[in-house]
Amino acid sequence: MFIAIQHEITDPELFWQKASGALTHPPSGMRLHSTLVSEQQQICQCMWEADSIESIREYLEPELASASVNTYYQIDPDKAIG
């Protein structure tokens, strides 16, 4: 399944430090497809592929929760464009 995450970044320096570690070597069965970052680096949206939202949440929250508020949602492949 495809999962989108919106990160509302509260501490940009810490977020990017942690994200550069967490995102470079995801566990088997998880794949990061895209990362979109606002110009001011206050919002970041990522598209992951994984078995469940919980698996992504369990992987990312320990790393990123101290630097961002994260919203996870499953993508509806029948309505997605692109």
Image (cartoon, rainbow, N blue to C red):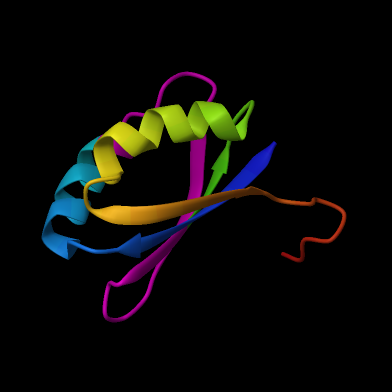
Query: What residue range appears in magenta?
Result: 22-45
| Image point (46%, 35%), residue name | 57
**Image coords of residue 73 (percent x, y):** 62, 49
Q: Nearer the viewer, residue 24 or 46?
A: 46
28 with respect to 73 (left or right): left
Task: Say left or right for 25 vs 46.
Answer: left
The image quadrant that residue 43 belongs to is bottom left
Is residue 7 shown in magenta? no
Q: Looking at the image, how many numbered discs can be counted on the residues?
A: 0
Residue 46 percent across, percent down from the top left: 48, 54
Residue 14 visible (yes or no): yes
Tell me residue 67's x, y (percent).
Answer: 22, 53
Apparent side of residue 4 relative to residue 63 in the rendered image (left or right): right
Where does the image place residue 1, in percent across and percent down from the top left? 70, 36
Residue 24 in view = no
Q: Quadrant of the C terminus?
A: bottom right
Q: Residue furthest top?
A: 28
